[in-house]
Amino acid sequence: MRAFTQHKGIVAPMDRSNVDTDMIIPKQFLKSIKRTGFGPNLFDELRYLDEGKPDQDCSQRPLNPDFVLNQPRYQRASVLLARRNFGCGSSREHAPWALEDFGFRVIIAPSFADIFYNNCFKNGLLPIVLDEEIVDRLFQETYDNEGYELAVDLAARTVTTPFGECFPFEVDDFRRHCLLNGLDDIGVTLEDADLIRAYEEKRRQTAPWLFAGGH
Amino acid sequence: MAGKTLYDKLWDDHLVKQRDDGSALIYIDRHLLHEVTSPQAFEGLRLAGRKPWRIDANLATPDHNVPTTERDKGIDGIVDPVSRTQVETLDRNCDEFGILEFKIKDQRQGIVHVIGPEQGATLPGMSIVCGDSHTSTHGAFGCLAHGIGTSEVEHVLATQCLVQKKMKNMLVRVNGQLAPGVTGKDVVLAIIGTIGTAGGTGYAVEFGGEAIRSLSMEGRMTICNMAIEAGARVGMVAVDETTIEYVRGRPFAPKGDAWDRAVAYWRTLHSDPDAVFDKVVEIDGAAIKPQVSWGTSPEMVTSVDGRVPDPAQEEDPIKREGIVRALKYMGLQPNQKITDIRLDRVFIGSCTNSRIEDLREAARVVKGRKVAPTLKQAMVVPGSGLVKAQAEREGLDKIFIEAGLEWRDPGCSMCLAMNADKLGQGEHCASTSNRNFEGRQGFGGRTHLVSPAMAAAAAVTGHFVDVRELLN
């Protein structure tokens, strides 16, 4: 996994609550057996005026001029500013894959859905929870200032505005450690292989029916 | 010291290691797989040169992409080549690693959350995960069950564990007796309408109270299934005699002495009387009426005798904007009566409502009636090949067909429209599925979430109606 330490980038405002994973990447694109290439279909139904299909050349499709990511000032955005309960719905990891493939590295919102939040960390994408009041201000500053950028420091756990305001955020130590170092958490878990085997041995005694095998 | 909640007990029983940083390694007893969220995980294993930790903990089936017609053709019946590749990839991965899979032509194939319980592969007290958010369904058996992403699918395959942080405890107590005609679906929609689509975020939610206790396992599965629509990854119901009787005799269930030993353990799977919850929500079950969602989030729901809300009455600006947007997408007017919403299609199926009891309830309503001529389609998609066979033994298929509903083969179908079953742009659908998100059932499609009985009532009248009027 790509490590995340610091990032500074243009902010795009996604000004609606309860953005669900169907909206982030519609189901017809989940048929891929790869992890890459989802970026052109990020927010497909909001971004294009026609119905998206897998394996299409998206550069030929009619764009929805009202959609935020189609506006020239946000096209190189790498920080997504969002509202409450971002990423609700399904467990599809295709949602963070699509955001990452588009070029986002950071998502800031007042709250995230649990599974989506968790999936982001596995893909070098940092979800940051800030108070709604602060998020409101960041939206306003983004609208008011073309080229508005935020600087994120994961080690220091801070978000800094171009005007020098600095907001601290919280993140689990384990997740932060893995993201800072780009760690493969399967490798970390397998360091405890003996503990897993010991647990299984104990469970085999107390709950043998769980190890009865197939049927 | 206060007693333990059901979640506390399940957590403690699966704890392999508590780390100093607050994270923990949790052991996974059962891993369910389907074709959409697993290919990249198997590929990851291969690239890292890893093998599955414990083959017999895994059970797989294709469900999202499978067609619901012409199933005798097997994989060749999947017209879309991209869908076909995904199903073939699951077959190949399971064959290569020796994982048990109910393939497309196996009668035991079905929606992963239907076949787990049906086979007894879901047992009380298990920790169960699947790359699908509706894995919370299995919590109905007193399991610690939740959805995971593809990276975690790979993690579970490789280590039989997940890295987790303990969630907070919430109890949703549904008091009183449900009125006749009111089902588990109505209860869970009413709960989501009350606590909101993020009300359960960060919590493991236990559903309790008299109304829950009196539900069948099917009803409890429907409720736990939609815990995620309230933001809770984990939904649970304590084990009781209803649970144990449901599991008895199923193919994967323990037999003989092992059964007795298991049952003795299962009877401990409830919250202690003095357990402390971080949050308790009380719901008056007797007051719940049949529910219908009007918007594009499961919390946008009301009673069938209600009206579409007026955004002008909403004080929270973000919610008001959400209502305005939803009404525009849904093509509805403020204050419009729910019973005046014109319908185009009816879908009875999905991991929420495709079990035998769901089909019986729907059949009871449509029996002797005809699908309204204004509808373009009404379809019934059983949750598994075995549910389909059971329904046919009971003659339910004939009741549906005589009434003019289509009787299909098992799969996820129009719940998320990854196969050929989908809504057209602007079409309204009475659906027994779990999500009314924009575009979920097809580009521009408009979903209204209801119970199977309410969907059946909508099928024979062409609009929403309180099913109790048809049952009297």
Image (cartoon, coloured by chain):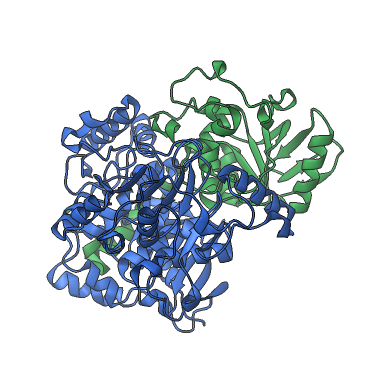
Chain colours: A green, B blue
The structure residue drawn at horizontal position 80% and vertical position 36%, both measured from the top left corner, is A143
Residue A16: where, in percent of width, then height? Answer: 66, 44
Q: Position of residue A119 (x, y in %)?
A: 51, 43
Number of numbered labels in the structure image: 0
Dividing the picture into quadrants, the one containing residue A73 is top right
In the rendered view, tell whether residue B421 sits above or below residue B139: above
Position in image of residue B62 (x %, y %): 28, 41
State whether residue A15 is above or below residue B241: above
Apparent side of residue A16 relative to residue B433 in the rendered image (left or right): right
Image x and y of residue B218, in percent: 32, 64
Q: Name the residue: 27% across, 64% down.
A: B364
Residue B425 in view of the camera: yes
Viewer-nearest residue: B231 or B20: B231
The answer to whether residue A116 is left or right of residue A134 is left
Q: Residue at x 60, y 29 (%)?
A: A47
Front position in the image: A186 or B182: B182
Is residue A122 in sight in this rendering?
no
Q: In which quarter of the image is the C terminus of chain B?
A: bottom left
